[in-house]
Amino acid sequence: MTKSNTALYGGRRLLKKQVHLTENGKNNQMNRKKVYWLSQISGWLVLSLINIAIYASFSDLTFAHVLVNLYLSFSGICLTHIYRSVIKKNDWLSLPLKQIIPRVIVASILIGVVLLLLNYTVNIMGGQYGLSRVRLGRFLFSTFNLSVVVLVWGLIYFSVHYFENYKKAEIESLIWEAAVKDFELKTLKSQLNPHFMFNALNSIRALIEEDPASAQTAVTNLSNILRYSLRIERMETVSLEDEMQTVEDYLELETIRFEERLKFNIKMDPPSKKIEIPPMMIQTLVENGIKHGISKRREGGEIFVSASVVDAKLKIEIRNSGRINQDSIQNATGFGISNTKHRLSLLYGEKAVFSIKNNSENEVLTELEIPIGGTNL
């Protein structure tokens, strides 16, 4: 697949995701409106029913009193809806807490006073009582009660939005982190193929004049690897069995170059064959072992690759002849080791284990443990 086709494919996927998110956003917005109005109406109606029940327990309940309380609920719905509009218009939700608190308190008192004045007006106009019954103490007490109701309304409103914004920010952060990881992994994987192909073609070029028959065999091995490389272009993981086949093709290719100086053996436990792993990871480590270990020895050496399942983890061991500088490995910036560390970190976090060390005087041991059951992406 060409870079332009890959970009087109990625663009289409991104467009589909954006459309899907837009549609979900519209649906969520409609659901939020329904929940808001349902909460508004039910909350203020419950307040009216409580007032009616309290009034009925102390005196005779009249139809006029029921209407007044219903009017109070209607006024509360209208005023708090206006209050909500003011909050949104002035972007109170983005203000720090020390600026929100005084605004909410003042708004609650003002709305409480307006609600009480509307209630008095209806009672006086309806003949429930006259101005002579209006007392300062009762006025302040009623204002306090209604202001507390509006204050509770405000606390609920701000709390709901706070937790929604917190959850939204957390989800967006996770999506962004996953997108960055996905981009980095694709970048790392795109670096694998050119690096490997360059080395393989150099090996074949050296054989063409010296041993055409061996060069022909090498081309066959390389074609198998190229086929594998093209197949994994759009795959995040491959089966261990497929990866090991590519490793074998690579080692066969290197055996032609090293002749008797290279011997290898590959062993897989049956349960491990179908486990999914990042593509080209084992091949890269094997290539690293040959390049920095066996190729530097005049007598060559051996490389042994094994895979098994231990404690719900895939354990891979690569043993190759040679010796490494342990200090330089800790701060490795070479392609094989640094690439492997980075990919494992992105895919599995702390769940994967990778180590490379001198196992004996003339043997390097590379160990890799991958959790079975998928990546963190």
Image (cartoon, grey):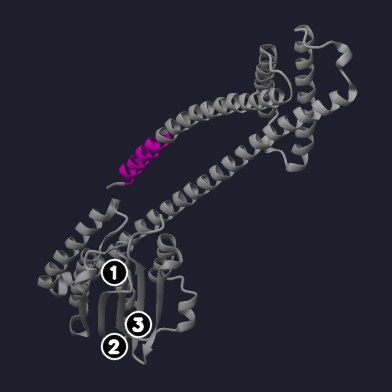
Q: Mark 1 points at which residue?
A: 283
3 vs 1, front mark: 3
Which residue is under mark 2?
Answer: 298
Image spot of residue 315 (x, y percent): 32, 74
| Residue sitting nearer the eye, 43 or 102 | 43
- Label 2 SS: loop
Q: Is residue 17 magenta?
A: yes
From the viewer's perspective, tell me whether residue 96 is left or right of residue 36. Answer: right
Q: Is mark 1 on a helix, strand or loop?
A: helix
10 Å crowding of disc 2: few (<14), some (14-19), many (20+): few
Q: What residue type is labelled 1?
A: Gln
* Type of amino acid at the residue the image marks with label 2: Arg
In three-dimensional space, the C-alpha distance between marks 1 and 2, rounded to whole angstroms, equals 23 Å
Residues at marks 3 and 2, CA–CA distance in whole angstroms: 20 Å
Q: Where is residue 36 in the image (x, y as percent from the top left)?
A: 57, 28
Stretch in magenta = 3-18
**Quadrant of residue 263 in the image?**
bottom left
Q: How far apart are marks 3 and 1 (CA)?
A: 15 Å
| Identity of the residue drawn at 55% across and 45% down | 167
Locate residue 270 relative to residue 330 in the image: left or right: left
* 325 w.r.t. 193: above or below: below
